[in-house]
Amino acid sequence: MSDLEGAIDRTVDVAVVGAGMAGIKAALELEARGMSVCLLEARDRVGGRLKPGHIAGHKIDKGGQWVGPQQKLLLAEAQAQGVEKYDQYNTGKSVLHYKGAIKNSNSELPKMPLVSLLELQRVVSKLDKLAYTLPADAPWTVRDAEALDSQTFESWIQANVWTEAAREFLRIVTRSLFCCEPKHVSFLYFLDYVRGGEGIDVLTGVSGGAQEAKFRGGAHQITEKMAAKLTSPVVYDAPARSILQHDDGVVVMTDRGTVRADRVVIAIPPALASRIDYANGLPVHRDHLMQRMPMGTVIKVHVAYDKPFWRDKGLSGMAVSDTLACNVLFDQSPEDLSCGILVGFFDADAAAEYTTQGDNARRNAVIEAATQFFGQEAQNPIDYVDNDWLAEEWSKGCYVAHMAPGVMTTFGAALREPCGRIHWAGTETATQWQGYMDGALQSGIRVAAEIAEQRGLRMAAE
Amino acid sequence: MSDLEGAIDRTVDVAVVGAGMAGIKAALELEARGMSVCLLEARDRVGGRLKPGHIAGHKIDKGGQWVGPQQKLLLAEAQAQGVEKYDQYNTGKSVLHYKGAIKNSNSELPKMPLVSLLELQRVVSKLDKLAYTLPADAPWTVRDAEALDSQTFESWIQANVWTEAAREFLRIVTRSLFCCEPKHVSFLYFLDYVRGGEGIDVLTGVSGGAQEAKFRGGAHQITEKMAAKLTSPVVYDAPARSILQHDDGVVVMTDRGTVRADRVVIAIPPALASRIDYANGLPVHRDHLMQRMPMGTVIKVHVAYDKPFWRDKGLSGMAVSDTLACNVLFDQSPEDLSCGILVGFFDADAAAEYTTQGDNARRNAVIEAATQFFGQEAQNPIDYVDNDWLAEEWSKGCYVAHMAPGVMTTFGAALREPCGRIHWAGTETATQWQGYMDGALQSGIRVAAEIAEQRGLRMAAE
């Protein structure tokens, strides 16, 4: 509050907290409806969980990056902003590192014993089928909600999957999608995510799936280009500290001053939203829900080589491990092949372990993984960069919040329910592709329509 | 910050945040070691989850109240403060309301089919035995920690208990101890609580157990009397908003000004502690732990009658139901029997449901329960009062935080680990009787010793 240079003191129709993709989309949609907006951002940049970076002189995404053909909202937005996509490199064999042994495979499915593979196909199909029974707008109302929500996904795996390789594959899937272990997540929440992402094959797939393509110049620039189209520019370095509702509006106090508005959109993850001081309280279900939606844990890494040497060996650069801390790698080489880049993740418990070890230990673990997967050439990188999302002050984790057992059935109905003049956006509130950029866009569109409707109703009543 | 009347601006050895039993005990112990202390409290009273109240002109505890013979720290503290205890009334039959039918029983154990009773005894003994294998200071290191922590207690019940009555009893126990459903809590966390509370019989028992006695004039006054012995009086209406650590100390910003100290003790529940702005961050394991320790949900109710009519019928006033929203009642009549009072609870999902219904609906549900348990005389109360702990701004729930599956094994080691100059107290950090007043005292004693040791080490190094 003391930094009066650049202090703001505004009165607008709608204040929006958080200039990630959800908040920017909400602001654009509100402005398109003729409302004045003040978009507040804690960081000194837009994008939230999308973040620009560089390695070996090339632009990379240190946050979200991929897009799949099902993600119509994101594809349309990227096109509208003039950001082109190109395919994830997916030529050659992928690598499965399982029980310490390396297997190469022509398919995206890991090479595993036939009996495991058969079981896995059966289990994946069963999970998908179950997921599609959930109603998108209220998964907590499905007939067996209590039973599904009373167990962890790990419990379900142990009770329903019999071959060790199929079990491990489902654990890797959970880590990759939620950045948590199967022990952390409710089976109902897992299923709802599978429903939102159109099935496990789509969620985990490259060609035809959620990792099919990425954006030239980085996904982050979509949010930059969107933000550039706002009538009223983003207010940076302005974390919302408290929100007061009164009869005629809301007052949002930030580190840079005060915004008065008719309504406010909170477009940040629940764990961050819980840290705002709601001066006259929130409905208790909302408060308790926010106590129960922790962020996943992930460290995204990039390592660069003078060339993509794995391609010469007929390998795609895609690799998955059941044991190595850096357990997933993809090819992230620039299109001009002026160097070779791998992108990978420490996720779930491996991220919780490596967050405390420092970036040198992480670098060593990544090089070790790349060496095991692709050979000795991996020992000599020309550059390395990582992003520890656990330690990001204004995200508190990534990719997405998850719910432990029982949370969805007890408090789920509070997820999108406006609290007076406070409206909730962010990818966690989406009914499709929650956890993804596409879900963020959906939430921004939905919240703007919700506010327009409320304001229309209010005007009609006056 | 703007309320400069009564503003504080102090420099002390140790700032303590939260004047519940843990914070006051820490402050007393620190003062006894010669340190200067500033004890900051968000509310206008001490006691935290202990709260004074009245019904029909009699003092009651709207928060924690009982003490058992195992709780040596609490017994000693009460004695030191000159607060006497008296036995919970426990003469006559208790009532079990199960599957819509009423059964009276001479024992504290509910009357149930013999096969269920036999199974229950076997299961309780098995749970106790398992609980005692956990190391008190690091339950997450027990040999089977991963397996125990990967499932909810509900999953364990379904896989290990076969009779419906025994299952329901364990669910009622969970609701009564944690104020959450078995679906919400990790089996490992459940076991650790059982260990800390010296077994399920002790935790749930009246005579010889954790509900054996209560305090004349209310448990809350123990904290008042403790606070009165502080050299430096409690600073009320002073919620800590941000904490900055620097090389030479900490700066605690509150709504009433600033306290500078060598160290700070945070003696509030994790969900509240997470809402303080740690200006230069916290170790990520601590932050992520606080994202994952939600408070239980409970509404404590009192209803008064012109006399304790149930006693005339040979009933103790103790009743338990598997289906009614107000699912536990005890006799809370004043010792002079000038009226009859019942105390009860809506807990876990029943509390989440009734928090939104208003106190009239709760009053009706309590009277309905008392009528079913004890007869038509319950229809005509002379007074009613309840306390919705979900809605308490400075508790955010009660009795205690719990951990969902996976939290203890991934982040448990951060529970008591000091973060630089920030030390953690509160009943959740206790290794014995966590969740109870006794655990709060233990945490206050432990944290004061921890700080004395650290300061001693520092002085030795200088």
Image (cartoon, coloured by chain):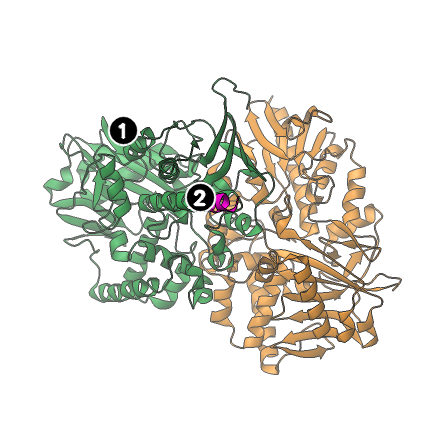
Chain colours: A orange, B green
Q: Which residues are magenta?
A: B451-462
Left or right of B168? Residue B271 is right
Q: Tell me the number on the disc at residue A273.
A: none
Residue with the mark numbered 1? B54
**Chain at tag 1:** B
Q: Is residue B460 magenta?
A: yes
Q: Where residue A375 sits: x, y (%)?
A: 75, 76
Whole-angstrom CA distance, mark 1 to mark 2, is 38 Å
Res. B368 visible in picture: no
Left or right of B440? Residue A441 is right
The relative height of residue A116 versus residue A319 in the rendered view (above or below) is: below
In the picture, residue A300 is in which quadrant?
Answer: bottom right
**Chain at tag 2:** B
- In front of the other: label 1 or label 2? 2
Residue with the mark numbered 2? B451
Q: Are marks 1 and 2 on the same chain?
A: yes
Left or right of A437? Residue A414 is left
